Image: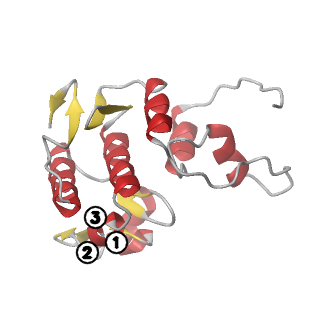
């Protein structure tokens, strides 16, 4: 393994790195190697499936008031947006057709997920510039949401997957279900 050097990054740079994460097992270094110019030697591992153990070990390194629970797993998140993203990724991992079915859902003039940022915001595509964030494999999700809107969307996501919100999956803020 190559020698690693520790660097400091600010919150905005970390958000960009996390926004490009493809799986919970992908390291920040692997994300940066993928995003940086191609003159770097390719040391990234081939695409690998996300295991439950990888999700659990990743959650140990994260801190925050927010979390997602699915069965006995609890995934910590630094904020509501990250908790929502984690919930969507978790459901996508377990239910392969989830994102396609979730993409059919919308509230007023916004889709829940879409294959392009501008397709999220049907009436105001300009919002995509600031509020559409990458999810996984070319999918994007809306981040301009209140706590109540996120809770409603995760309830709909659970229903699409045939599971129950509150019993099978839930979002927590300070260990209290939203």
Disc 2 versus disc 1: distance between alpha carbons?
Answer: 7 Å
The residue carrying mark 3 is: 112
Mark 3 neighbour density, 10 Å: few (under 14) some (14–19) many (20 or more): many
Query: How far is the residue under mark 3 from the one under mark 1?
Result: 11 Å
Q: Is residue 109 above or below residue 28?
A: below
- From the image, tell me which residue sits under label 2: 104
Residue 100 is tagged as 1
Q: Nearer the viewer, mark 3 or mark 2?
A: 2
| Quadrant of the snapshot with the C terminus | top left
Q: Is residue 167 left or right of residue 12?
A: left
Q: Earlier in the sequence, mark 3 or mark 2?
A: 2
To which quarter of the image does residue 4 belong? top right
Query: To which quarter of the image does residue 158 belong?
Result: bottom left
* Mark 1 surroundings within 10 Å by alpha-carbon count, few (fewer than 14), some (14 through 19), many (20 or more): some
Kindly check if marks 2 and 1 are in contact, taking CB atoms under 8 A apart as contact: yes
User: In the image, what residue occupies the spot 21% across and 70% down?
Assistant: 106
Q: Residue at x 25, y 37 (%)?
A: 71
Q: Earlier in the sequence, mark 3 or mark 1?
A: 1
- Callout in the foreground (3, 1): 1
* x, y percent for residue 164: 13, 49
């Amino acid at each position: 393994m190559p020698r690693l050097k520790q660097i400091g990054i600010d919150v905005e740079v970390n958000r960009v790195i996390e926004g490009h994460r493809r799986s919970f097992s992908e390291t920040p270094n692997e994300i940066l190697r993928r995003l940086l110019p191609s003159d770097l030697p390719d040391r990234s591992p081939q695409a690998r499936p996300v295991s439950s153990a990888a999700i659990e070990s990743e959650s140990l390194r994260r801190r925050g008031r927010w979390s997602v629970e699915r069965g006995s797993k609890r995934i910590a998140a630094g904020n509501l947006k990250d908790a929502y993203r984690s919930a969507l990724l978790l459901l996508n991992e377990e239910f392969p057709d989830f994102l396609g079915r979730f993409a059919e859902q919308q509230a007023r003039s916004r889709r829940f997920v879409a294959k392009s940022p501008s397709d999220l915001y049907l009436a105001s595509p300009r919002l995509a510039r600031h509020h559409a964030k990458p999810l996984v494999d070319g999918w994007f999700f809306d981040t301009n949401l209140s706590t109540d809107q996120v809770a409603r969307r995760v309830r709909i996501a659970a229903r699409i997957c045939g599971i129950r919100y509150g019993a099978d999956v839930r979002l927590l803020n300070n260990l209290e279900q939203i």
